[in-house]
Amino acid sequence: MAAVDIAVPGGNRALTPISPPKRRLSWQTWGVIMLAPYVLVFLVFVLYPVSYGLWLARHPASYQTLFDDPVFFRTVVNTIVFLLVAVNVKFMLALFLSGFFVHERAWIRWLSVIFIIPWAVPAIPTIRRCATSAPSSARSISTSRRSR
């Protein structure tokens, strides 16, 4: 007996083409997607200004004008003093305070709260301003919550 293909109304499943499996994005593709915003910010805020500064610096007359300006040397001195003194003093103070606030004593916890207050307080007017500048419907909700 010879093999005979029989026509089935739904079609012969053995002869229907199989679609390729869906490809998932590889780790490298996700890496490129995640790095794209960083690269864009880097190009706009770092590479462009540096390139523009180098393009402006190609004229020797710019340096002559810069060195003739009496404010320039004072600015250089202030920058060096800031780098040598202020940065190192702040670093040493932060290192000392981080070691100080590690101790487990009640008065040190209160002192750390007092130390954090100047950092946290500027957020309070911002929060209050956002609450008062909300649309009237949102404002009525917030005032009804306060009246309870």
Image (tube, rainbow, N blue to C red):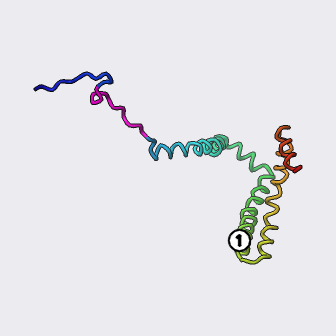
Is 142 rendered above or below residue 122? Answer: above
Q: Residue drawn 83% across and 43% down?
A: 141
SS label for mark 1: helix
Q: Residue 63 at what x, y percent from top left?
A: 70, 47
Residue 22 included in the magenta stretch of the image: yes
Q: Is residue 15 left or right of residue 108?
A: left
Tell me which segment is drawn in magenta: 12-23
Residue 56 found in image quarter: top right
Q: Is residue 123 left or right of residue 5?
A: right
Residue carrying label 1:
98
Q: Residue drawn 50% across and 44% down?
A: 30
Q: Residue drawn 15% across and 26% down?
A: 3
Is 60 rendered above or below residue 106? Answer: above
Viewport quadrant of the N terminus = top left
Q: Residue 22 at what x, y percent from top left?
A: 41, 37
Q: Nearer the viewer, residue 28 or 5?
A: 5
Q: Residue 33 at what x, y percent from top left?
A: 53, 42
The single residue placed furthest to the left in the displayed view is 1
Q: Nearer the viewer, residue 90 or 147?
A: 147
Q: Residues within 10 Å of mark 1 (few under 14, many from 20)?
A: few
Q: Is residue 16 left or right of residue 29?
A: left
Residue 131 included in the magenta stretch of the image: no
Residue 6 found in image quarter: top left
Q: Nearer the viewer, residue 50 or 36?
A: 36
Q: Is residue 25 left or right of residue 54?
A: left
Which secondary structure is most common in the magenta stretch?
A: loop
Q: Residue drawn 80% across and 52% down?
A: 71
Q: Residue 144 at what x, y percent from top left?
A: 86, 45
Tell me which amino acid carries mark 1. Ser
